[in-house]
Amino acid sequence: MGVVEDTEPPFKRAKLLLADEPNGNSSSIRATSSVNNSLGDLMARPLTSSSQGDDETIGSKGVIKKSEFVRIISRALYSLGYGKTGAMLEEESGIPMHQSVVKAFLQQVKEGKWDESVATLHRIGLVDEKAVKAASFLLLEQKFFELLKFEKVADALGTLRNEIVPLRVNTKRVHELASALISPSKFMSLSSSGKGKESVSSRSKVLEELHNLLPASVMVPEKRLECLVENSLRIQRDSCVYHNTLDSDLSLFSDHQCGKHQIPSRTVQILESHTDEVWFLQFSHNGKYLASSSKDQTAIIWEIKADGQFSLKHKLVGHQKPVTAILWSPDDRQVLTCGAEEVIRRWNVDSGDCIHTYEKGGIGPISCGWYSDGQGIIAGMTDRSICMWDLDGRELECWKGQRTQKVSDIAMTDDGKWVVSVCKGSVISLFDREATVERLIEEEDMITSFSLSNDNKYLLVNLLNQEIRLWNIEGDPKIVMRYKGHKRSRFLIRSCFGGYQQAFIASGSEDSLVYIWHRSTGKLIIELPGHAGAVNCVSWSPTNLHMLASASDDGTIRIWGLDRINQQNQKKQVQASSSNGVLHRCNGN
């Protein structure tokens, strides 16, 4: 919102003011935003030097000006409520937080002495005249509002006509102020302090805007020290390749640096209840369960105990073909299982019972997913079509489009707007359900699988050429990063996001290893050995940053946790879970 000097007469409709007085043509509501702290010291003449000297520096690099450092600390003390200590620091250091003229200015604003504050503003020494005009406009506008509040209409008119208009800034706002003179409702909508509120409230807002308007060298920004410290911690965190801890673990007492030990790298449990290759697995959204599906035609729901140990909750039996995937409903109360080119079944997580079966005559599902609200399901079918059903099995939509192959993966974004699917060998379709338009992502090789990030802004795509690509799908899709190193030649291998703010990429591999990369840099961090067959799928717990699960052709699921360094106890902590659990047969339709 720029502050522009006026060149045209303003009041073509407001007859209360002189028609020939000059005004501006800015469309801004407030004439403050364009002049901000970025102007820095260029907007102000140097403050009077303190006894310590403005050029004195501290710190090993000699880049921290002592006077600025002390002033920022004083500001922090006052902000924290330590007023006496702040005053003592100013007195002992001889470095005032604000120049005396600035202190007087701020006090006048607090007390509503608008004429005096405008006069003092001109004595501060601001070089930029636009900043002076914008600040004057802000002060006089508040004066105008307070006069109207106390029904001093003639005085308010005088302020508008004789003080605000000559500034030649923000014509649109001046017109609005003029209309407030004849419309009480307009006054209420424009005034920063509504009827019945204390003037001090709106004056505090004026002070906040002045902080944004005037250079930081004149008025030290509120919470400036906190901002500097937070930025420092953020930079340390973002530059830490292995960072995988919560922000609450960051400390001011030492520089932050995670080690590789923050990445799940040691097998803490082996789950062995499947009798054939495990093809798919996924943690529930609440992190309390893990679901897996297998070539053995079953799916299993595993419950995670308080101590982190897994136990078999339900074995889901009823499919007549291998179960290619198992997917959690948005509320984690149900799961879908997809029988390869057979049927889709919906199960109750608490009871383990099959609630409904979805099928279409003559064709079977290849992939499936949930509606974003959990009130329907979506499936890629063997005839290359995409079908949607409500929970009761009524077909809602079915379309084929330009697809030339079976839909191996399908998903719907959390807002329900986009359906993501593989529509051709090397093309992913982003279908906008609202606008009924399709955007395409064209890859260089055959696409085998994909997964969406939690924020639905990124797409992780696995390719036939042993490369994983990260796409930003906001706006025009573009490649962000590539990940290499894992092996894939024959099987469908899946990857996933995970860790702190999904800062890592994990993937299975045909060489029996689990691979983990740093998402932003593409650096391969670690390879995890342990499985005796191809690792088909991985899933990172959404609630436990240090828990990763992998599914393999060796028929097992490995749960990975932190390496506690105590190698002697490692074997004792690797537990095999082979409980038969409760066998449930599907009777639903």
Image (spheres, helix red, strand yellow):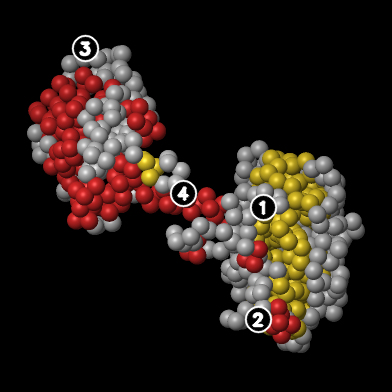
* Helix, strand or loop under label 3: loop
Q: Nearer the viewer, mark 1 or mark 3?
A: 1
Disc 2 secondary structure class: loop
Q: Amino acid at mark 3?
A: Asp
Rendered residue at 54%/55% (across/down): 237
Q: Which badge, 1 or 3, comes first in the chain's sequence? A: 3
Residue 113: x and y in percent read 12, 36
Q: For the image shown, how many numbered marks are present on the structure?
A: 4
Label 4 – label 1 distance at C-alpha:
21 Å
Q: Residue at x 69, y 40 (%)?
A: 478
Rendered residue at 37%/30% (across/down) = 39
Residue count near mark 1 (Cα–Cα under 10 Å), binned few <14, some 14–19, many ≥20: many
Real-space Cα separation, disc 2 to disc 1, in angstroms: 28 Å
- Dividing the picture into quarters, in which one does residue 532 lie? bottom right
Disc nearest the viewer among 4 and 3: 4
Q: Identity of the amino acid at label 1?
A: Arg
Give the residue number, with chain letter if any, for mark 1: 519
At label 2, the amino acid type is Gln
Q: Which residue is mark 4?
A: 231
Note whether 468 is above or below 50 in the view shown: below
Do the numbered discs 4 and 2 sit on residues whose CB atoms are within 8 Å?
A: no
Q: Which residue is disc 3 drawn over?
A: 20
Q: Return the x and y of residue 301 as percentages of the image width and height.
A: 70, 77
Q: Nearer the viewer, mark 4 or mark 1?
A: 4
Q: Tag 4: residue type?
A: Asn
Horizontally, residue 579 falls left or right of residue 157, namely: right
Residue picked out by circle 2? 309
Q: Work out whether 174 lies above or below 408.
A: above
